[in-house]
Amino acid sequence: MTLNVIRPPRESGGWKIHVDAHFLVLMESIIAKSSYPVRKVKEMNLNENHDVINVHFMERLQSKMEELQSQVCLGMDPRFSGNASIPAFLLSDHDGDYNSTIKEFNSRILESARDLVPAIKPQIAYYEAFDAMDALEHTIQLAKKNGILVIVDAKRNDIGSTSEAYARAIFDNLGAGCTTVNPYLGSDCILPFLKHEGKGIFVLVKTSNASSIEFQDLFSVALPGIDPEISKVPLVYHQRSGWTIDPSLKDEASSRLFLERNFIQVARLINSWNAPFVETWGEEVLGPVGAVIGATFPGQLKALRTVMDNTMFLIPGYGFQGGNASDVKYGFLEGKRGAIINSSRGLLYAYKISKQHACDPGNFEKATIAAIKDMMQSIEKTLGA
């Protein structure tokens, strides 16, 4: 009985796992006892040599980044007002039809950027706002046709059955490979997304907006055994032992409490969701659950990377929101791995808002390509050649 796990150069396709027939039976037994939604071995896409290639979305994303030597994710958020917006002439050419206007704009961008960006991130709200879901589906299919991975930024979550409906809508109907998810409702609302084999999710951990500190940066701690009707827990401070629960609520008044920020608590949950996968496939793999961490908070980004070794980071907030290459460097693992940097307005509408690349609206895609190349060079320079 043999199991050979081989990690060849990324350009050859990523992970390859060779198993013999006896190992297939063993793996079926292991997976049957696991609560984690790992694909059954008999359902894996085995070739004649029993090779399993490209295990899940995050590994495919990492492979694509290394293939293109690019860590840039292109946010594709259609706008029709303000400085960062789709050229007015396009909307006029399409007689005010948002769907067809967005289709042409996105198509020209994608056809030009296919050799530069491993992934795109369309924010679903912008398409919903313009009743342009047809344009979103067109964008996703065109991206896939050009070998570009798709992360639908939807930030969905709800009770388990509704989460499953959200997951089906994004993965099955739209055909996206990955989506963003809000973790606030807890694990039972995350797991429905993970049941969709081969897909991935990015969980909101530390978002790029300024007011994220109002909740995400608060300190908290789990206190098992406390009456669920108690909404406030008084603490007392002892010079030797530090903060402890008031003795009237807990017998062990000398027990120390270790508070962690809420974004660290979410990070540890992500580790637990990825753990079965990492235990199965090895310490070097990236789990199927990634983390959204804003470039606008480099200190928090650095702290989070120290507790998340097997997690792909999606880092928004680069460029227009104020993040730069020096800020995002802390999000990477060794070998420039494990992080993809998103920029939306700064790239998509460079023809209008970029000091270096502003140009005639008719050539908008050329400005976007130039801005992408500048971003790639800045990241590469910061990470080191």
Image (tube, rainbow, N blue to C red):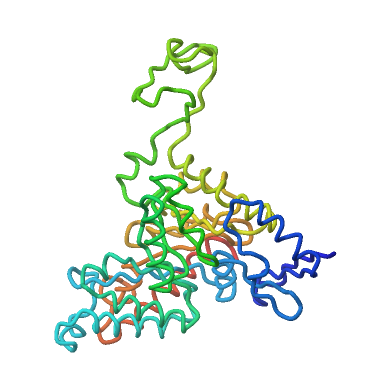
Question: Of all residues shown, which one is farthest toward the right?
Answer: 1
Q: Nearer the viewer, residue 88 or 291?
A: 291
Looking at the rendering, which quadrant does residue 370 occupy?
Answer: bottom left
Residue 282, position in %: x, y? 70, 56
| Most foreground residue, 193 or 275 | 193
Residue at coordinates 58% horizontally, 52% vertically from top-left?
274
Q: Quadrant of the C terminus?
A: bottom right
Q: Is 132 displayed left or right of 117 in the figure? A: left
Q: Quadrant of the N terminus?
A: bottom right
Outermost residue, bottom direction?
93
Q: Across the whole image, how many numbered discs are drawn on residues?
A: 0
- x then y, percent, for residue 210: 31, 47
Q: Please, is residue 17 above or below residue 229 in the view? A: below
Question: Image height check: is 180 above or below 363?
Answer: above
Q: Quadrant of residue 42?
A: bottom right
Q: Tell me where residue 111 appears, x and y as whole percent.
A: 41, 85
